[in-house]
Amino acid sequence: MARKKHQTYEGLGTKARDKPPVKKGLTKKKKEQKDFQKVKLKAGKLRPKGVNETKLEFQSKAILIREQLREDGAPERIQDILLRLRKGSASQKLAVLDALKTRLQNDEINSWLPSLQSLMDSCTSYLSLESVSHYRSALQCLKTIFSRVQPVESLDPLMSLISQRLISLMTHLNDDIRERSVPVLELLLHQTYSSTLLTNHALSILESLLQQLMKTSRSERQFISTIDSTTAGSNSGHARLLDCIAQLVNIIFDKYNSEQPNTKDTNEDDGQDRTLFDELHRAKLKPFRFMDQLFQIRSDSQILSRVLDLLLKVLLQFWSEMRIHLGDRHHHRDALSCLWCCTRIFHRLMNSILSSQHYTELHSIIAQHSSSIHKHLLQNFPFDEHQGSDILSSKQVQQKNLTVRRLNIHIIDLLSTQFPRIQEQITKNLNQSSFQLKSDQMQPLLNYMFDLLNNNENLNVHETKDTLDYIEKCIRSFRDDAIIQQCIDGISKYIQRSINDLHTNAIAFRIICDSISLKIAKLDPQLITSLPADDMVWFVFQVLRSSESEFNKNERKEILERMTQIFSFELDPFSIVLNNIWIDYFAILKVSTGIEQRLLITWLYGINAKQPLNNSCLLSLQQYIQWYWLESESIHLLLGILLRQFDRHGENLCSMNEFSLFLLRLLFPSFKIDGYVTEKITDVDANRTFKYGEIIINHLQQLKVHRDDVIEALWIRIENAFMNNRIKQLKWFEWTTIYSLISIDNEIFPNAIVQSRLGAHLIQTVQQLPRTSDQQFTQFIVSRVRTSPALKRLLKECLALTGNDQELYAMCISLLD
C-alpha cells in the first residue's frame, strides 16, 4: 500500500511538522553591495553618518622586498651578489649587474679585490649574451675594475681568461655579438699598463683579429661597426680597428725587440760551440722548463711569421679600399684616418725589423709582399692636398692633426728611406736582388720637402715635424755629399725664418749639426759663410732658459754637446757670434751648473785667430774666476782652454799685454793697478786662489810655443808692481805663486829688485819654519826649494842674510842638500 507524503512510520523518520523551525534568512546568500549604489533604508532607520565621505585615516601593511630587507641588516657581500647572477630571470640579472656596478664604484677596493677572479669571470661571461643591456652593464663593470685596480700583478693571472673571452667574442657566429669585441679590445689597450698586461697575449689576439678580417668580404664586413659608442669618439669603425691593430703591433715588437740575444752571450757562443747537453747542464735541475722555453720561443717565432703575413694582406686590403674613399666627400675623414693608421703600422714594422738582427725569417715575408706594397702605395700618389678640405673644419684638423700633406710625407718616407734599408738587408741575408733607391733619385724628393718648409706658410707644426724627420732619415740613410750639402743649405734657410716652437726647431738644429759634422772636411767656404750661427746660438740659449718640463736634463745636454762640437771646428761665423754675445753668454754661464756649465765653457775653443778676444771679455772671465762664480772644475777647464788657445794662436787671440794683465790680476789680487778695484780676500778665498794659481802654473809649464813669452811678460808685470810704492803686503798664496813661477825655468829670472825681495822673504820663511802655524805654506816652501834649482841658487846667494844666526844657517844648508 502506497505511503503518503505526510505519513510517517516508526523507525523510518518523522514528519516535517515535527522538525524544529528554521529561520529563512540564514539559508539565503547575502547579496553583495555594488559600488555607487544608493543604500535602501528600512522604515524607521536613519542613514549612517559619513557614508559619502573619504576617510583620511587608514592603515596599510608594509611590503618589503629582499633588497630592503638586506639594507636593514649588514651590506651584502660581493660574493653573494655574484651568486645571484647565476639564477633568476633576465630582468633580475640586469638589476644585479646594475647593483654590482654601483658597489664596485662606491665600495673600498679592498672589500672586493679578493673576489677579483670571480668578478672577471662573471663580467666577461655576460659580454656574449644577446641582450644589449646586459652587455653594456657588464662592460661598465669591467671599466670600473680596470680603472680602480692599480697593481698590475693583481690582473696579470687573469689575462689568459680575459684573452680567451675576447677571442671568443671575435670569432662568435652572431654578427651583433662579434661587433662587441672592438670596444672590449679598446678597453684593454687604453689602460696605462696595457703593454705589460698584454705582452704574452697580444700575438694570439692579433692573429684571431686578422683571421676574422680575412674571412669577411668587403660587402659582408660588419665587424667595423660597434654597438657601444662610449669609446668610439670621433673615429669610424675602420679607424678604430686599425688603431687597435697598431697598438697590438707595438706591444708585440716591443716584446720581441727586448728579447734580442745579448752580445756577451753571442761572443761566448762564438768562442765555443755548445751542445744540447751543455745547455741542459746549465739549466741544472730544471731541464723540462728549459725545453718548454725553447719550444715556446720556436712556436712564437712561427706564429709571428704567420701573423706578419696576415697583417700585410689586411693592410693592403684596407689601403686599396680607403684610397678610393679618400676623394669621397662623405668618407674623406674616415679614409684619411685609416690610411694614416696603415702608414703608422708600416713604419713600425720596418723600424722593428731593421733594429733587430734575428728577424731573418721575417725578411722573406717582406720580400714576398715588397712589390705589392710598392704597387699599392704608388697608386693615386701623391694624393691631392685639397681633397676633403671643405669638409674638415679647422677645429677637426687641430684635434686630429691629420692632413693629406702629412700622409704624402709619410708615404715618401716609406718609399725612399724605409724600404731601401729593408731591401738592403734582404739582399744581404737572402741573396736576393731588389730595387734600391739611388742618392740622385732622392734630390727631387728633398727639393719637394724643402719647398714645403721654406715656401709654404700654411704648413702646420705636425707637418713640419714630419718633413724634418724625413730629411733627417735621408741624411742617415744616404751619406752622400750632395744630399748633405743640400740639407745644410735648406735647413739654414728654414732656421733663419722659422717661427715654430722650440721642439720643432730642435729637429732642424739636430739636422744641421749632424750635417756639418759629416761634411766638415768638404764644406764649401761660401756655404760656411751662410751658416745661421746667430740663430743656432740663440736657439741654444732659449733651450737653456726654458723650464725643466719643456726640456729635461738629457735633452739639454744633447743640444749643448752638438753645439760644442760645432764650436770646436773653429768656423768663422761661430767665432764672430761668440765675440758679439758675451753679455748673454756670461749671464747663461753664471746660472748654469754641472755638465751644462762645463759644456758652455768649452765653446771658447771656437775662438780662432781671426776674431781676437777683447779686454772686456778677459775682464769678465777674470771676475768669474776670482769671485768664484763658477764651479771648481769649470774654473780648471776654463784656465786650461785659455792658456792652450793662447799657445796656439798667440797674439792673434789677444795681445800679450792684455793676457799678462789677465794672469796678474788672477794670481796677485793684492797688486793695485790703475782702473781695477782691489778686493778684500778672506781665508776661504785665499785657499781657492792658491788652488787655481797652482793650475795656472802647471798649464804654463805645459805650453809649447809661447811659454817663455808669457812667463817673461808676467815677470815684467811683477817687477813693475814691486817698483810701485803703492804695493801692499803680499798674501801667503801670492808668495807661493812667485816661488812656483821662479821654479818653472832656470833661464828666465826676475830682476835684482824682485830677487832681493824674494831672497829676504825666503830667509824669513826658513827662520819661521819651526814655529809657524801654517803647515800648508811651510810644506809648500820646503818642497819647492828642494826640487827647484833656481830657488836653491837664490838661497845660496842669500846666505849672507842669515848673519851670525848659526841655527838659521844650518837650516838653510839642510834645504840645499
Image (cartoon, helix red, strand yellow):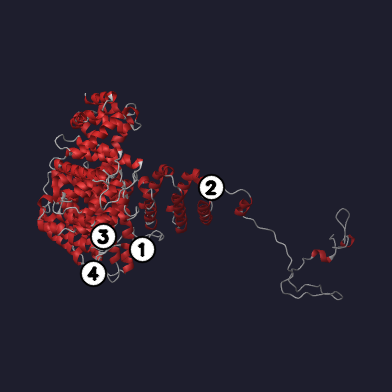
Instruction: Please give the residue where the numbered disc 4 appears in the rendered image.
Output: 386
Q: Residue at x 46, y 44 (%)?
A: 117
4 or 1: mark nearer the eye:
4
Find residue 584 and report its horizontal and vertical position in percent.
Answer: 27, 56
2 or 3: mark nearer the eye:
3
Classify 260 as above or below 658. above
Count all numbered tags in the image, as a single digit.
4
> 814 or 539, which is in the foreground?
814
Say few, some or many: other residues with alpha carbon within 10 Å of mark 2 (under 14 / 14 to 19 / 20 or more).
many
Residue type at numbered disc 1: Ser
Judged from this view, the residue extending furthest toward the front is: 804
What separation in Å lies between label 1 and label 2 (alpha carbons)? 36 Å
Residue type at numbered disc 3: Leu
Q: Earlier in the sequence, mark 1 or mark 3?
A: 1
Q: Residue at x 34, y 31 (%)?
A: 772
Classify 306 as above or below 794. below
What separation in Å lies between label 2 and label 4 (alpha carbons)? 57 Å
Q: Earlier in the sequence, mark 4 or mark 1?
A: 1
- Left or right of residue 679, residue 81 in this image: right
